[in-house]
Image (tube, rainbow, N blue to C red):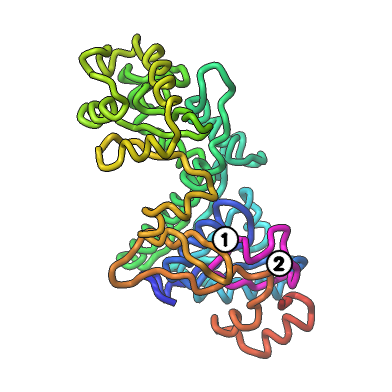
Amino acid sequence: MTGPLEGFRVIEMGGIGPAPFAGALLGDLGADVVRIDRIARAGTEPDLPARFDFYNRNKRSIALDLKQPQAVATVLKLTSQADALIEGFRPTVMERLGLGPEVCRSVNPRLVYARMTGWGQEGPLAQEAGHDINYLALTGALHCLGEADRAPPPPLNLVADLGGGALYLVVGLLSAAMEVRRSGQGQTVDVAMIDGVTHLMSAFQAFRQQGSWTGRRSDNIVDGGAPFYRTYATRDGKFIAVGAIEPQFYTNLLEVMGLKESELPAQNDRSAWPAMRERFAAIFAERTRDEWVALASRRDACLAPVLTIDEAPSHPQMMARNVYAAFDGVRHPSPAPRFSRTPSDLHRTPPTPGRDSRGALADWGIAPDEIDALEAIAAMAGA
């Protein structure tokens, strides 16, 4: 393994969504991430074949039956060797398993215990089920997205699960780990997706209170309302995206389009935006996507092609940066961000549950006879 987190040990309690993504990011950065999977899944191929389960790359899997005290005791032994633990269950699930933060820190006072939920550890919705779109809805962010005369569309599950959840967990976990170096004491990091998304909405909350952001969709500067910051269909049925906010870039965009600024309303005259959007749409419909890209090349017009998920990997910029990497015969997004001295890499293929049970337990200090005993009582399973 390489990466800035080499030697940093993380236990991840098996789950779905943002917590596994956070674990994979830590694994990309070089951490030794061991995932505790349910024994019932040991040796089986998940619904998503393991080699395509990118959220589990750069990890090892141990399959344990946490209904058995011996398995719980094993997790606590692993915890005594860990720098951090990640869990993404509903509140109190880990406490009922006998693996709550107080118990875990009783065997390792330096442990950073990172908890991921959608609604948070307390409050009237704490025990309610939910997904990215639900958390996004409660924060006001979802209402801001989409066309004015249509229902707000779900923006994949990038914003709440990954942006407001996984990335905040990684920041919180690593911040707490740095603080351990000063105090010698671990702590609990409470990550709620509604907290993270609300924090991401900081600028728009400010704009709304200041009066420069309306409560209507597609009516504002970066929500598609501005004619110079939105997508347009091209002659071939594809799309281009323009984001020419600053005056100099707006001037360049107009030149690419064959328009003169003196013949148009002021750039930020909101009353003129609807008519300008229609005019821009008609102009962009006259050429193909790639023709517009060629016209705008090296002109600082902030115009880019809207590539499909299949087109993106072969774009020259993506290829020049090696944004994707071949790994085990599959195209993976490359680790990010990048480090000059301790580069991240892809070093472990995503495991089937239990693939690494014996080896990972041994590496983390569990004696061979203890591993045999766990297997004998079916508290542990291998691949």
Amino acid type at circle 1 is Phe
Query: Which residue is painted at 62% across and 71% down in the image?
Result: 61
The three-letter amino acid code for the residue at tag 2 is Leu
Residue annotated with mark 1: 54
Q: Mark 1 and mark 2: span between their CA atoms?
A: 25 Å
Q: Residue 73: image x %, image y %?
A: 65, 74
Q: Is residue 294 magenta?
A: no
Looking at marks 1 and 2 on the same chain, the residue that comes earlier in the sequence is marked by 1
Looking at the image, residue 366 lies above or below residue 263: below
Instruction: Please say whether residue 48 is one of the residues in the magenta stretch.
Output: yes
Of the 4 image quadrants, the one containing the N terminus is bottom left
Which quadrant would residue 53 be assigned to in this image? bottom right
Query: Which residue is rendered at x = 66% and y = 54% of the image?
Result: 93
Q: Return the residue nearer the eye: 62 or 235.
A: 235
Which residue is nearer to you in this view: 83 or 18?
A: 18
Q: In the rendered image, which residue does mark 2 sit on?
A: 66
